[in-house]
Image (cartoon, helix red, strand yellow):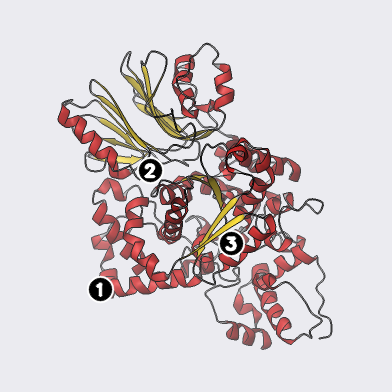
Amino acid sequence: MCGILAVFGCIENSQAKRSRIIELSRRLRHRGPDWSGLHCHEDCYLAHQRLAIVDPTSGDQPLYNEDKTIVVTVNGEIYNHKELRAQLKSHQFRTDSDCEVIAHLYEEHGEDFVHMLDGMFSFVLLDTRDKSFIAARDAIGITPLYMGWGLDGSIWFASEMKALSDDCERFMSFLPGHIYSSKQGALRRWYNPPWFSEQIPSTPYDPIVLRKAFERAVVKRLMTDVPFGVLLSGGLDSSLVAAVASRYLTESEAACQWGSQLHTFCVGLKGSPDLKAAQEVADYLGTRHHEFHFTVQEGIDAIEEVIYHIETYDVTTIRASTPMFLMSRKIKSLGVKMVLSGEGSDEIFGGYLYFHKAPNKEEFHQETCRKIKALHLYDCLRANKATSAWGLEARVPFLDKEFINIAMSIDPEWKMIRPDLGRIEKWVLRNAFDDDQKPYLPKHILYRQKEQFSDGVGYSWIDGLKDHANKQVTDAMLMHASFVYPENTPTTKEAYYYRTIFEKFFPKNAARSTVPGGPSVACSTAKAVEWDAAWSKNPDPSGRAALGVHAAAYEESLGDKDANVLSGSPQKLGGGIVGQAATVFILWQLLQANCSASWSLDQELTNCSLIYLKAFFGSTLLCVGA
């Protein structure tokens, strides 16, 4: 990732103003520590902090067209730049940078070219011939971009809020899939996929089509001239990314420079679920695996720095960003500059555990649409800023435009969680890669229950955060929170604690308005909280808040659950199919404790409920020699 800053229409264009732009651009140097650039044209400034991934020797920015009348500063990667160059035969390119095509596409097509770009990007382009300019952000908002206005009438764009918050009276998050044109003086949406309207699709599920689309998405992201790897938590999404990357790495250009053995990285508290699962996947795939540990105290000590970098006070984002922030520092110390990551799958396929309670396919699909539209405020923000804090670039294959269009065109009936048919969350994705002839992953990894990143690194991480916040925030402080923070009022001590840190770094009203609010259970939107009345009593974004769904739900200790089952009262665990699934999970634990030695099953399955067992074994469960 790089850092960009652009300012247009400054009243003052003295050396002092240039120095101020350079000073503000330095606030983004963590994103691009490799080189700095600045172009000044009258009262217009385009600054760049570069992280060199493609063409590290000659691709410094800003970039230009042939006669330097078009200037562009870009953060991102254009995966189809070679195909686009081939269409621009009459143009002469100065570098091998993938981003240079943007200047030439503008020359050729004017402002209507952004849809041609396949990649993740935020850019600002200046046409010095008439001093007009455009700014644009990728379809989903994988790369961050902010837009602000100064009291002198100037307009600002920056990769992170910290570069413009002091000098702008008002600023906002630039909307994903949009372009701003100075000629029109307004934002307009350039990304208009069929799913955006939230109409219910009807395309039949084809596992091969889905698999091939994802493989293409991973392969195109192997475009790099620097060392790279994969963030591997051992969950389904990151494991699939690693499996596909490992399978196709030998055929890629990257293998010629960096070898054909994939590097994988995982972080967690010692003994956490992710560490064990990631090691197993790494052993299966034959990757060179790097396991990093952190303690709860080390995470707590990093919280202030994390909030400064990720620029949010959202609870679940901070919980998950902290271990990712710590891991990114370790990865960069190894000389790695780019990683692939698994963000986006849960939003596309309804992978969060609260989707078990979706009442019908219509609400299921509409919730996935809402989740994708909000990714730039949550997981994309986390994945980008937590890694960029240390000059590391994260690429996300699940958010490939083609893949999203294919996945979101599937009739959502196929995505619905159906225990009676052995379909667990993200079944369409799991099934697409369930290949007995050439397996991508072990079955029990392919059908592992969803574990949110902030949970999977170790449950005591979240519990430790809550304990720490309880010591920092008094009951009186929380009671008066609505007076101190009337906008997005924190409702827990943990949220209050994060908010106080955020306000210290970003005290303006405009800053706090960039962060979303509202109730959430297990990362749901506020609308989905309505699916279960009990959730309103436990509004926590952790996956364990999905009572009766997660195998380690907050509700009761195992001993209490045993007592409920043995007393004939399993309904206390939750009603309906989900409650039954949780009950069978407990019965399985009792069976494991009481059956003879002839009962054998991989230990990983102790994390599974009925529908996971059914998906793994089929509909018949036998206990021999009980």
User: What is the secondary structure assignment of the residue under circle 1?
Assistant: helix
Q: Position of residue 432 (x, y in %)?
A: 73, 49
Q: Which mark is residue 31?
A: 2
The Cα–Cα distance between marks 1 and 3, rounded to whole angstroms, is 34 Å
* Left or right for 427, reference 317: right
The Cα–Cα distance between marks 2 and 3, rounded to whole angstroms, is 33 Å
- Density class for disc 2 (Cα within 10 Å; few <14, some 14-19, many ≥20) is many
Which is nearer the N-term, disc 1 or disc 3?
3
Which is nearer the N-term, disc 2 or disc 1?
2
Q: What kind of residue is marked 3?
A: Leu
Seen at 80% across and 65% down, the residue is: 618
Q: Is residue 354 above or below residue 148?
A: below
Seen at 43% across and 27% down, the residue is: 58
The Cα–Cα distance between marks 2 and 1, rounded to whole angstroms, is 39 Å
Q: Position of residue 617 (x, y in %)?
A: 79, 66
Point out the residue furthest to the top here.
90
The residue wearing badge 3 is 353
- Density class for disc 1 (Cα within 10 Å; few <14, some 14-19, many ≥20) is few
Number of labels in the image equals 3
* Left or right for 41, reference 71: left
The residue wearing badge 1 is 476
